[in-house]
């Protein structure tokens, strides 16, 4: 008998069958990740028991047996037969000192006001949808530092002649920078060459004034020396020649008034720093606590990034002298421990200054930390510059862009985007390294916490652990926030093709 076979042709595609119930959902993920093999199961159970025991011990010490209220050490002493817990009453009693240090109580509103300005301007700049980004950046990086300086110190600075000469030299350099970037000057123009030479000469005159002794003279009702007078006049001449060169060229005449901005900003800055605003002067040796830590960290961050960018560009420069000086600077500071830099700034730097010239202790530490961090930042930025394809440089050159225009508009935005993790990693390391300033006598946040351990009113076995845990949580909060924001910026600026 012949078997009959009926043919079947599907007229619709077959839908995929659902996965087995044991392979999807939370139980399946739990099994796949934690209990895939017997060894994984044992390791998971052992790790879970260890984590549970640690969490319970921390909860028992920090919450169940902790002391939250008390006037002195007796409140944190455990009763007979009970375990001792955290002494949060110590943290509560000295919280204001942890935040402000020895800053006068009646003047602490100035720290609060500066903090509010920083949070508002920083948040407005960090939130992508916030308007007026350019204005916020200008206020945060150009105006806020000087406002905070006057608020925290009281202002009424007495500027010496050499310092005024240095400020005018910086204004001359800024005028040339604006002329090259915004106006589009050509550096081979005679007036611009003369202005550049005078600017370099003004900086050289300031260095000579700082290292050598010259006759003192009275100039513009200020005490100058002969070298600083020459440097001041050279800087002023450079500004005048740059502006005159802009007006002399019909192509740049309409944009020439913008070159007066650096000089106007400098005059306003000098007037603001020397004005009497009615604030009580507070010396920096009264600064301390979290306020001092933030001052050191923010100053180091704000100074190290632009200086590191310039050093990275200098190390990749084709000019042998600039490249050599950049390499020497970077390798020297990278080869010296930060604690050595602080000791040098504290004890050795005054030996090289002329007699009668002193520099504030905090200022010396800020300069040392900024230079140290800038060397590491330069290598991070250099890695980003090396990652940019050669075609980007060639494309910018084909558009006729100058060197600074090419770097500002084409190369640096791409390079900095690539090295955001390295930049933020350097910032986090700098924030934690601020605790080293306590070695040279500055009462930073961690140093202030540790000084509280020796207070007879709060000496107990649990006081050091409570204070250090509180400090660790605060350091972690700042560092974790920087890390998460850097991840957010990486994702937002990621313009690559995603698969």
Image: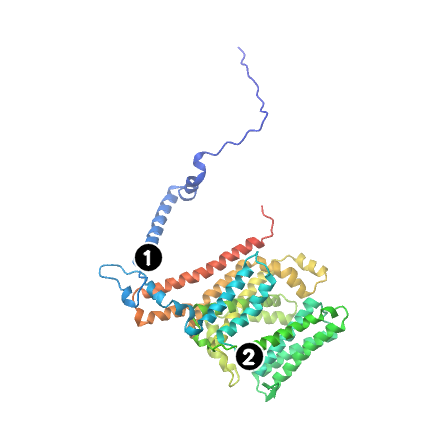
Residue plotted at (55% across, 77% down): 273
Q: Earlier in the sequence, mark 1 or mark 2?
A: 1
Residue 307 located left or right of residue 455: right
Residue 89 shows in the view: yes
Q: Dot 1, how many residues are within 10 Å of its Cα: few (below 14), some (14-19), or many (20+)?
A: some
Q: Is 375 in front, or is 101? A: 101
Residue 282 located left or right of residue 201: left
What is the quadrant of residue 182 in the picture?
Answer: bottom right
Which of the labelled discs sits on residue 259, or is there none? Answer: none
Q: Is 407 in front, or is 336? A: 407
Q: Are marks 1 and 2 in contact (CB under 8 Å)?
A: no
Q: What element does badge 2 sit on?
A: helix
Q: Position of residue 138 (x, y in %)?
A: 59, 66
Residue that sits furthest to the top in the current view: 1
Viewer-nearest of labels 1 and 2?
Answer: 2
What is the quadrant of residue 471 in the picture?
Answer: bottom left
Residue plotted at (29% across, 58% down): 65
Please name the residue that numbered disc 1 is placed on: 63
What is the quadrant of residue 137 in the picture?
Answer: bottom right
Q: Position of residue 11 (x, y in %)?
A: 59, 25
Q: Is residue 127 above or below residue 28?
A: below
Q: Dot 2, how many residues are within 10 Å of its Cα: few (below 14), some (14-19), or many (20+)?
A: some
Q: Is 238 in front, or is 393? A: 238
Residue 77 located left or right of residue 488: left
Which of the labelled discs sits on residue 274, or is there none? Answer: 2
Q: CA distance from mark 1 to mark 2?
A: 52 Å
| Figure quadrant of the C terminus | top right
Q: Position of residue 179 (x, y in %)?
A: 69, 70
Q: Position of residue 113 (x, y in %)?
A: 49, 68
Residue that sits furthest to the left in the current view: 80
């Amino acid at each position: 008998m012949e078997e009959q076979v009926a043919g079947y042709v599907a007229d619709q595609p077959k839908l995929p069958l659902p996965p087995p119930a044991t392979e999807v959902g939370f139980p399946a993920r739990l099994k796949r990740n934690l209990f895939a093999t017997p060894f994984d199961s044992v390791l998971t159970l052992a790790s879970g028991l260890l984590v549970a025991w640690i969490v319970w011990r921390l909860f028992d010490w920090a919450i169940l047996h902790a002391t939250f209220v008390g006037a002195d050490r007796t409140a944190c002493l455990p009763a007979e037969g009970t375990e001792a817990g955290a002494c949060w009453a110590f943290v509560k009693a000295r919280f204001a000192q942890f935040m402000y240090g020895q800053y006068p109580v009646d003047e602490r509103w100035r720290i609060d006001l500066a903090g509010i300005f920083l949070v508002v301007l920083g948040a407005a700049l960090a939130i992508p949808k916030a308007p007026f980004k350019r204005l916020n950046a200008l206020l945060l990086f150009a105006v806020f530092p000087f406002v905070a300086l006057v608020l925290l110190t009281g202002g009424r600075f007495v500027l010496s002649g050499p310092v005024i000469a240095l400020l005018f030299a910086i204004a001359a350099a800024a005028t040339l920078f604006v002329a090259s970037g915004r106006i589009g000057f050509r550096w081979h123009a005679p007036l611009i060459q003369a202005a550049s030479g005078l600017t370099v000469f003004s900086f050289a005159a300031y260095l000579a004034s700082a290292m050598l002794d010259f006759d003192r003279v009275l100039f513009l009702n200020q005490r100058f020396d002969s070298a600083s007078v020459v440097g001041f006049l050279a800087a002023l001449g450079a500004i005048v020649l740059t502006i005159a060169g802009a007006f002399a060229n019909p192509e740049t005449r309409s944009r020439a008034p913008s070159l007066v901005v650096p000089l106007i900003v400098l005059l306003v800055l000098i007037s603001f720093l020397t004005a009497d605003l009615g604030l009580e002067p507070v010396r920096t040796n009264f600064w301390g606590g979290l306020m001092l830590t933030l001052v050191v960290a923010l100053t180091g961050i704000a100074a190290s990034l632009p200086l590191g960018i310039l050093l990275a560009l200098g190390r990749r420069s084709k000019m042998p002298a600039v490249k050599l000086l950049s390499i020497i600077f970077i390798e020297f500071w990278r080869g010296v421990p930060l604690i050595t830099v602080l000791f040098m700034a504290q004890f050795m730097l005054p030996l090289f200054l002329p007699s009668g010239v002193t520099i504030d202790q905090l200022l010396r530490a800020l300069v040392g930390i900024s230079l140290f961090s800038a060397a590491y930042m330069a290598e991070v930025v250099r890695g980003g510059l090396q990652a940019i394809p050669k075609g980007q440089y060639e494309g910018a050159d084909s558009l006729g862009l100058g060197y600074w225009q090419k770097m500002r508009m084409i190369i640096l935005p791409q390079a900095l985007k690539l090295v955001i993790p390295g930049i933020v990693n350097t910032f986090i390391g700098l924030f934690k390294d601020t605790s080293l300033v306590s070695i040279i006598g500055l009462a930073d946040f961690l140093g202030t916490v540790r000084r509280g351990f020796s207070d007879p009113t709060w000496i107990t076995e649990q006081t050091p652990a409570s204070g250090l845990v509180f400090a660790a949580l605060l350091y972690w909060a700042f560092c974790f926030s920087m890390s998460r924001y850097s991840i957010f910026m990486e994702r937002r600026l990621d313009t690559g093709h995603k698969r």
